[in-house]
Amino acid sequence: MYCSNCGNQLNPGAAICTNCGANVPNLAAGAGGNSETPVSVGEWMLMALIMMIPLVGLVMMFVWAFGANEKKSKSNWAKASLIWAAIYIGLTIIISIALVAAGISFFDYLTMESIY
Ligand SMILES: [Zn+2]
């Protein structure tokens, strides 16, 4: 069992971390420390606000998804949003390639028509 705040190895049954003083989730609540404090309304509001800023929102999404100190619900949400962003970008690229390819073949068709 390690401290979720500083990574210090904890004494079994310890209520607080001896290194940083952070509260240690009760082991009876489940192994792996599933009992984390939920993301507060204010935190969600701040996240929604940051998400409205282009580029900054994307960068923060990576920070939230892979940051070591982020809450699991927050990082899971950020990962899900990143996957959707990747799908959206992938689809946009595929559709634009398909449109360009269709445009080229139509252009070929036109030039062939004029030759023969
Ligand atoms: Zn600690």
Image: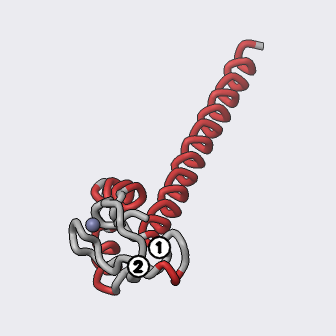
* Amino acid type indicated by mark 1: Gly
Figure quadrant of residue 31? bottom right
Residue displayed at 30% across by 66% down: 5
User: How many angstroms separate mark 2 from mark 1 (CA)?
Assistant: 6 Å
Q: Nearer the viewer, residue 76 or 1?
A: 1
Give the quarter of the figure containing the C terminus.
top right
Figure quadrant of residue 10? bottom left
* Amino acid type indicated by mark 2: Pro
Task: Give the answer, above or below, for where 51 lies relative to 15.
Answer: above
Q: Is mark 2 within 8 Å of ligand 1?
A: no
Residue 67, percent from left and from top: 35, 57
Mark 2: give few (<14), some (14-19) or many (20+) Cα within 10 Å: many
Residue 73, percent from left and from top: 46, 73
Residue 92, percent from left and from top: 55, 47
Q: Earlier in the sequence, mark 2 or mark 1?
A: 2
Figure quadrant of residue 107? top right
Residue displayed at 28% across by 62% down: 6
Residue displayed at 69% across by 25% down: 110
Residue displayed at 47% across by 73% down: 33
Q: Name the residue under label 1.
A: 33
The reply to whether callout 2 and callout 1 are in contact (CB within 8 Å) is yes
Q: Name the residue under label 2.
A: 25
Left/right placement of residue 113 relative to residue 26 reads right
- The residue sitting at the right extreme is 116
Left/right placement of residue 12 relative to residue 103 reads left
Q: Nearer the viewer, residue 58 or 95?
A: 58
- The residue sitting at the bottom extreme is 41
Task: Give the answer, above or below, for where 93 lies relative to 52.
Answer: above
Mark 2 residue element: loop
Give the quarter of the figure containing the N terminus.
bottom left
Mark 1 residue element: loop
